[in-house]
Amino acid sequence: MSTSPVFDADHFKSQFPLFSQSENRQLVYLDNAATTQKPLVVIDAIRDFYLHSNANTHRSSHRLARRATEMVERVRGQAADFLGAASTREIIFTRGATEGLNLLAHSLSADLQAGDEIVLTTAEHHANLVPWQMVAERLGLVIRYVPEIAGVPQFERLPEVLSSRTRIVSMTAGSNALGFRTDLQQMRKLLADRELAWIVDAAQLAAHSAVDVKTIGCDFLVCSAHKFYGPSGIGLLYGRADLLDTLPPWQGGGEMIADVDLHSSHYAALPHKFEPGTSSLAAIAGLGAAIDFLNGQDRTAIAAHEQHLLSLIHKNLGDIPEISLLSRPENNLGIVSLVSDRCAPVDLMQWLDGKDIAVRVGHHCAQPLARAAGHTATLRASLAGYNTEDDVAQFVAAVREFVQQLDRLDETVVSEPSVDWPEDDLSHLDIAQLSQNNNWQDRYRTLMKWSKSIGPKPQIRTEALLVRGCESSAWLAHREQGGRHYFAIDSDSRIVKGLGALLLCQMNGRRSDEISAERIRQTFIDLGMEQQLSVSRSNGFNALLARALEFLR
């Protein structure tokens, strides 16, 4: 239901066709920091392009090509207004923020010398870390980081890492892992009168706040349309025209040249010298529709609505002792981040998925921040304008129900670990009984119970025995006695332990010729695990199986 007399969340949501599909009518979608859903006007614009304007742009003069070219340049003008750019020459279409950052890393480093410095923060998405690391390694540059506490940058201490050798400062406008906003006006003051290039990664900001590059004062800014209700595969790079004019292009090919002979090329004027090849034209049409859609909304009211929901979630989850909130509702871009000492985030995520509540688990492509905060993975719920108080209530209720389930599971006593990890007793596990569970929720509960059969084994938690996963990790050890194979597994995730028990009960105590990888995989499929578990979780089971089979060779 709506939470504000000014903003009607239900009406806003009604403009997004995905939620009206029969399979999605009960969906609580809280994965908006990864990608937002698309309003009908965006979907229609993409369809309309293919129906009426599908042709390549700029080089051809026939009717369809003219229409496509007019559309692209019209949307470029919309994008310039959307970001507050001085002219369309300052707007470059990319495949997304990641490509924009890679372009800048390549082109801005062209004139850098060994020993020059790049300043980043520990809160950056990998897209704003890895390209700079690659450039630094190639050219002998130095990367410095804003001081941090538990991974959270102390932005006011930026001057401590600036020096006469600082050439580039690239930072997020808001953390995709914890949600905190960067005070960009503070950054503008701290960077005033310095001879360097200032880049802002606005991937998370653009959906929740109007962006004005003149007010921000940055030299470059990137964002992705799919984060603000637009299509995937298209993004924006803003750059000051005087700076873009001096930069070499990143990629070569058609459309970005004025003239080519056998030994040299002359590049096209801005912005086309940075747009090689055929752009994602239908996505550009969808981007224009998304900008129009947002411009037609009361964005201040949407932001207030999101803030209300954000405060509500933090307040209600804060009342659950087993849940630790890493995010704060103040000055937050719609993100709730949490962990629990009693389970791995992936266990809670799988439970929520069974309730048709979509959240995300992992390091969120921000591993340095996660590690500095003392975690390998968190559960993230992220908001958009179409979320409602009902969504919040369902989410919080499902978390409470999961915690209550843990209380029942933890009544089972687990034996203390032994130095030589004696074989876990899996004799009572019945795959046939598991297959008789009528739905995923029942199978999930059964797997969680099975996890109690896997005792803690800190002695096998070594790098050599680690089986890595994005959402959680597991350790697998092996020994052979009398021609029979025995395995030990450990993980912070209960669902991983449950899946490990499913695997080991088909392998432990058997000879090599009694173990069939094909039969184990088929059992996994027959139980419906592939349909119910995420790709990474299914791959995690397969990774455990593959590692176990390696021990048999």
Image (cartoon, grey):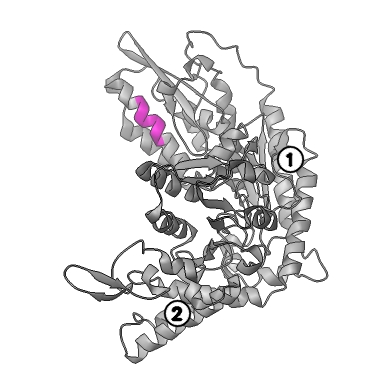
Mark 2 or 1, nearer chain start: 2
Q: Quadrant of the C terminus?
A: top left
Identity, as a three-letter code, of the amino acid under mark 1? Arg
Label 1 Cα neighbours within 10 Å, binned few <14 / some 14-19 / many ≥20 = some
- Name the secondary structure under disc 2: helix
How far is the residue under mark 2 from the one under mark 1?
49 Å
Closest to the observer, 402 or 11:
11
Which quarter of the figure has residue 299? bottom right
Label placed on residue 379: none
Say which amino acid is labelled 2: Val
Task: Give the percent coordinates (x, y) of residue 85.
Answer: 57, 73
Q: Is residue 193 left or right of residue 551?
A: right
**Residue drawn at the location 69% of the way across and 74% of the way down:** 297
Residue labelled with disc 2: 72
In the image, residue 435 lies in the stretch drawn in magenta:
no
Q: Residue at x 47, y 75 (%)?
A: 89
Image-based side of 178 in relation to 63, left or right: right
Tell me what residue is drawn at x 45 percent, y 45 percent.
Answer: 116
The magenta segment: 542-548
Residue 277 lies, with reference to residue 158, above or below; the image says below
Residue 547 magenta: yes
The circle on residue 400 is 1
| Residue 488 in sight from this viewpoint | yes
Q: Position of residue 344 (x, y in %)?
A: 60, 33
Instruction: Provide residue 473's location: percent of width, then percent of height.
Output: 49, 31
Does the rendering let one see residue 275? Answer: no
- SS class, disc 1: helix
Decide if residue 297 is on the left or right side of residue 280: right
Determine the main secondary structure of the stretch shown in magenta: helix
Q: Viewer-proximal residue, 313 or 105?
A: 105
Around disc 2, counting alpha carbons within 10 Å, would you say few (fewer than 14), some (14 to 19), or many (20 or more)? many
Identify the residue at horizontal 71%, vertical 56% (top origin): 391
